[in-house]
Image: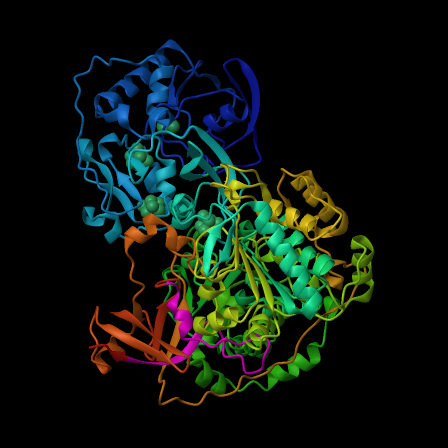
Amino acid sequence: MAVSDKSEIEINLTINGISLNSLSGTSILEVALANGIKIPTLCHDPHLKPVGACRLCLVEDKKSGRIMASCVTPVSPDMAILTDTPAIKKHRKNIISLMIANHPESCIVCNQGNRCELRRIAADLGVGQTGFYPMPFYTGLEEANPFIIRDLSKCILCGKCIRADHELVVIGAIDYNLRGLKSRPATVHEMPLEHSSCTFCGTCVSMCPTGALMAKNDGYVGTPERESSTICGFCGVGCSLVMGSVDGKVIEVNPSHKEGTVNQSTLCVRGHFAHDFLNVSERLTTPLIRKEGKLSPVSWDEALEYVAERFLSIKKANGPQSIGFMGSSKCTLEENYLFQKMARAIIGTNNVDSGSNGGGQMVLTHLNKRLDGGDRVKSLNGLEKAEVILVIGINPTQSVPVVGYYLKRASRFKGIPLIVVDPKKTDLVPFSDLWLPVLPHTDSELINGLAAMLYARKSYNAEFINRFTEGFETYRDGLSSVDFERVSHVTGLDRGIMEKATDLIEGRKIAIVAGQGVLQQRFGTRTMDSLLNLALMTGSLGGEGKGLYFVSKENNQFGAWDMGSMPDFLPGRQSIQNNFMRKRWEQSWEVKISPEPGLNIIRMIEEAEKKNLKALFIMGENPVQSLPQPDRIIRALNNLELLVVQDILDTQTTRMANVVLPGATSCEKEGSFTNLEGRVQSFKPVVSPPGKARADWEILDQLFSKLGYAKRYPTLQKIREEISRLVPMYGELESGSKAFWVKETSNRLFFHPDGEGEPIPFSPVTSIEDETSNDTYPLKAILGSLRYHLGSGTRTGYSNRIRDFALKGEAEISPEDGIHLNLKEGDIIKISSPDGSISRAVTLNKDVRQGLIFIPTAFHENDAMRLITFAHMGDTDFPGWKECNVRIEKSE
Ligand code: SF4
Ligand code: SF4
Ligand code: SF4
Ligand code: FES
């Protein structure tokens, strides 16, 4: 029986004379470690398949005298294992001595320092001078890329990097090359990493036991003085990190490798390498007030008194609705709670929103309504147990890479059928069973078409439908009248490929992974409806590996919503129009709260354009870079009497402010985030904020006081206690350190199958309007992200490593369109939409459909936003923020 091929048969054995029980298939090493018995290892990692490469974990069976590698030997009955006999020690010393003889002398200046496992084990075994003739194997340092240095002279051939690359992130960029003494992990044809399929996730780097693979730094940074756990503040996955610091500066980031975390031993290039933005000189370090047209340093007291005095005088002169609060899904739960409380309880306005509005909040709110907030908790682990996975409107390998790893592992190692719906051939497509290259914004037609095919095959979950839903008859009638010819015409997919997709779905519960391509799409709400209908029809709701996995791009998008950083929701996702709930909040805060929803981000900008909005408090957002039509945003912000921006970096928006308040990044303060799974994770500061910068919750608390509010929050714990008391889904927040899942509070029958609660309604089948061809703007541009940047690229744009990688963000068109438009690789083109123009180099990509042009966002200060229309997602004529019609011309 192979190791990890575990069965329920119990095995008794002894290790060092201690009687132990284990299941058959467990390795001797696993049993030893689980019982606190140490065995040295170099090639073992609990997240990788054991290979027995280093032979350091040798143990001896007392009965047979057999010596074996404990990591690859399964336990068998009545074994009497000894882990430290003289013979074993001798073998281990020999192995380590040979490795050291093969090692270069540069150990002293190696950044791995005392963390090198080879050095540590050598010291433990008392191996100093080996007595062997030194035979170092020198290889050139490979360091052309700005992320990873490979010094393979320090490689001990443990193979961890290769297994991490193949088994955890499923990239396959490296493998063993050559044989014998010369064998080394390498890319195909020994190409530099930047010319391979490497994504610079760094997972191999943090697995390497020696200094053979290291993160590249600007100079020698030495070994971290401190290592502290925190949570990645970039995307919604919420990876668990360990940050190493020297002299109060973060110099290194690794995954925490902790069991039960969302990422375990993996990270992506942003989490691993882009945190160098923390140390740039553009960090805000002191409060600033605009004086005589120039932002000038002032004390905290002066800045906060000025802000409070101006807010109160503007409120007095123009009423509370003349003030807006634009919060951030990058800030913590506690900060979002205080921010919206300041708006509602002190200023008296519901004009409060967060950056997640642009991430498709309308569509999520719609889903929330249909499920009454149910199906919140969706562990990504469940994807590896799914029956079939449908990925739609997202390229997770770029935008949320750790989700991409889950999907690739599910497909490659678990054989779970994977269907990818995307106009572009993404890098997930090679892992899929079927790719549906649907035309932009026609996803709802496709999903209705698939549901209609299932219905025609009488394949639906009648028991689930009867028990938990209502309105199936109307939906069924809609499905009966779906015109497949039209679906085919609108989506650009022939009927045969849709039948194949139906074959894969039929009889299975579906896990639907959806993202910005649905949330920010022109017909996002309809696509949302069609996906939920499909999930209901197939009984794919609740439990692991089924239902809707909505992927939030920003780290605390769902948390900001849960905390009420929304114009129409109070904390706990309670509608502002729910009289009962609103009155409860009025009693708790001892204020009156208007039942009228406030202005969202878009409406705030529109009201600023009309000069109705007089003051805006922006915390952690850079709307000039993140919203469409930046010139329009600049004009609107220029109309304000007061613009207060609390942020961490010098941005296009802080440069326009009247007052700038320097805040702290997540690794410089204490707080909590809710990730896309509904997992709430708290963290403590790794380092202090730079200069006079402060944790954002502290700034808000001090502003509460300056605004005359009696209640203070001297500690973060005070805020957590208030949230726990008033927001039942976050009842566990006050416990502080332990991660927990948000509590489901849905009133839908499905979540209370005891007969209490309401059925989940089907929505009727609707069709989208036919699109007419556009002769002036004949190409359809799709805007999407690349893994090196997050969102608008404000933070990642300041990462020196990302800058040094010098990606140009080329626009991608099909080779056919290249010929047709007389364009070749590298040509500079002007891309124009009805809203604006940008310039880009062009690349010809056979994975892009003819008639489409893919434009990466976040490059060139996110200038792609110039092409799309500033519009409210709820409006019927909303054109979508993921696409627009364009024409392209070659620049002379
Ligand atoms: S580079 Fe590091 S992880 Fe990879 S085989 Fe060599 S020592 Fe092991
Ligand atoms: S950085 Fe990531 S993708 Fe590149 S070789 Fe290492 S594990 Fe593979
Ligand atoms: S950016 Fe997202 S996927 Fe990458 S390390 Fe951070 S949380 Fe994880
Ligand atoms: S740890 Fe067992 S052979 Fe390396």
Q: Is residue 123 left or right of residue 358?
A: left
Colouring convention used in this rendered image of the protein: rainbow
* Front in this rendered view, residue 798 or 138: 798
Indicate left or right for 174 with 698 as reference.
left
Residue 122 sits above or below residue 558 on the image:
above
Q: Quadrant of the N terminus?
A: top left
Picture layout, residue 831 above or below residue 554: below
Q: Is residue 795 visible?
A: yes
Magenta range is 861-888
Q: Which residue is drawn at the image coordinates 64% and 46% (left, top)?
A: 702
Quadrant of the rendering where the C terminus is positioned: bottom left
Which quadrant of the structure image shows residue 135?
Answer: top left
Observer-nearest of 411 and 172: 172
The majority secondary structure of the magenta stretch comes to loop
Q: Residue, x 33% and y 18% (percent of image)?
A: 122
Q: Position of residue 141 (x, y in %)?
A: 21, 38
Residue 439 makes an appearance in the image: no
Q: Residue at x 68, y 70 (%)?
A: 318
Ligand 1: image quarter: top left
**In the orientation shown, which residue stands out farthest toward the front?**
292
Image location (x, y in percent) of residue 382: 56, 52
Name the image quarter holding residue 715: top right
- The reply, left or right, for residue 189 in relation to residue 463 is left
Residue 310 locus on image (x, y percent) = 63, 60
Count the marks: how many? Answer: 0
In the rendered structure, the answer to whether residue 463 lies left or right of residue 175 reads right
Residue 833 vertical position relative to residue 735 in the rendered view, above or below? below
In the displayed structure, would residue 730 be above or below residue 541? above
